Image (cartoon, rainbow, N blue to C red):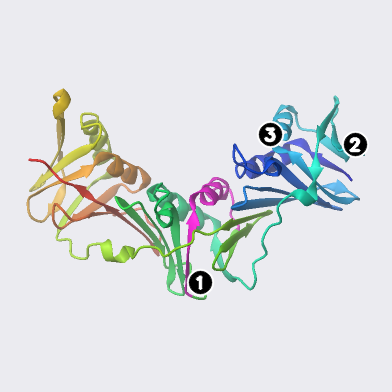
Amino acid sequence: MKFIVSSSYLLKQLQVLGSVINSSNTLPILDNFLFELDHKALTVSASDLETTMSATLDIDSTSKGSVAVPAKLLLEILKTFPEQPLTFTVEENSTIEISSNSGKYALAYAPGEEFPKSVNLDEPSVTLVPADVLATAISKTIFAAGNDDLRPVMSGVFFQFSPQGLTFVATDAHKLVKYARTDVTASEVADFIMPKKPLTILKNILGASDAEIKIEYNDSNATFSFDNYILMCRLIDGKYPNYEAVIPKENPNKLMIDRTQFLNSVRRVAIFSNKTTHQIRLKIAGAELNISAEDIDYSNKAEERLTCDYQGDDMQIGYNSRFLTEMLTNLQSDMIMLEMSLPNRAGILTPVDGLEDGETVTMLVMPVMLNN
């Protein structure tokens, strides 16, 4: 088994695949990349059992075969090469030899048969989504997904497909984000919960792609195919909470304000808030928004006044500044709308401008009890 490949081309592909590999694996074989050679196509795969990703590379070769090569070692050596062709040759003594312009390097390999086989989906449902839409949907929602191992369904992003459009939801019970598109649709109604890790990998590589992504899914697995990559992952098992039920429908108090100005104020005032609750207080009266925080233990306090466009009753409401900051940072619009009903009901944050046709973003932030 022998093939020739460009060093920088191989490194670029392996760095993407390397993000799948865990730092500590229960199965030693998972510390390797699987190289499968079939004449002019080389398929490289990486897996952590839950998520498997493979890339198909065009190379120069006349042979067939499969070997598992130590990932960390291979990435380290590839990073040091200037752009040049590298020749990989599998030797008899269980080593694979890499020949460059300046030298030769031998690594021990394992037989390719030991690598876990990827699952084949039987008669999956298929939906096509443009790369930029999926990348935006992931980056808009993933930050709101939870980290609680006791509630695994909340640790992922909920995908809801229908002929009316696509909806992506993430929540950790304190904050919730719903991202919807009506300009991209699916042929049938389906929903599943995607884990965070494969979504993070997708988010990092989709930004540069303008491909259509083919999403295939059944009850337990989903596959994302685009360009020369295939990412396969096991879905989170369970029923997603009824998120529509927690979004308050009647919100008579509407506050419209410049996003950057509001975000900077919240950041500054939050420095003076209690370090465990991160509580800040919004007091709205007329066209004035008063943002304050106090840490009684250390006698720290801060208060800022902003002008805003407000319709509704005068009110005071408390929020966790970290959640508010995360949400405001995640939005790209110039102006935002905060809709509220009562100090103990969730507030709804939406962008006023900067959205594409058919795109909606709804963010929900739970209030914290104010101690007067």
- Give left or right: position of 270 versus 93: left
Circle 2 crowding by C-alpha within 10 Å: few under 14, some 14–19, many from 20: few
Where is residue 169 shown, x and y percent of the image?
39, 59
Element class at badge 1: loop
Element class at badge 3: helix
Q: Which residue is mark 1?
A: 186
Q: CA distance from mark 1 to mark 3?
A: 40 Å
**Quadrant location of residue 8?**
top right
The amino acid sitting under disc 2 is Asn
Q: Which residue is mark 3?
A: 72
Q: Is residue 47 visible?
A: yes
- Give left or right: position of 292 versus 203: left
First in residue order: circle 3 vs circle 2: 3
Query: Quick one: quadrant of the N terminus?
Result: top right
**Numbered circle sitting on residue 93:** 2
**Quadrant location of residue 293?**
top left
Which is in the foreground here, disc 3 or disc 2?
2
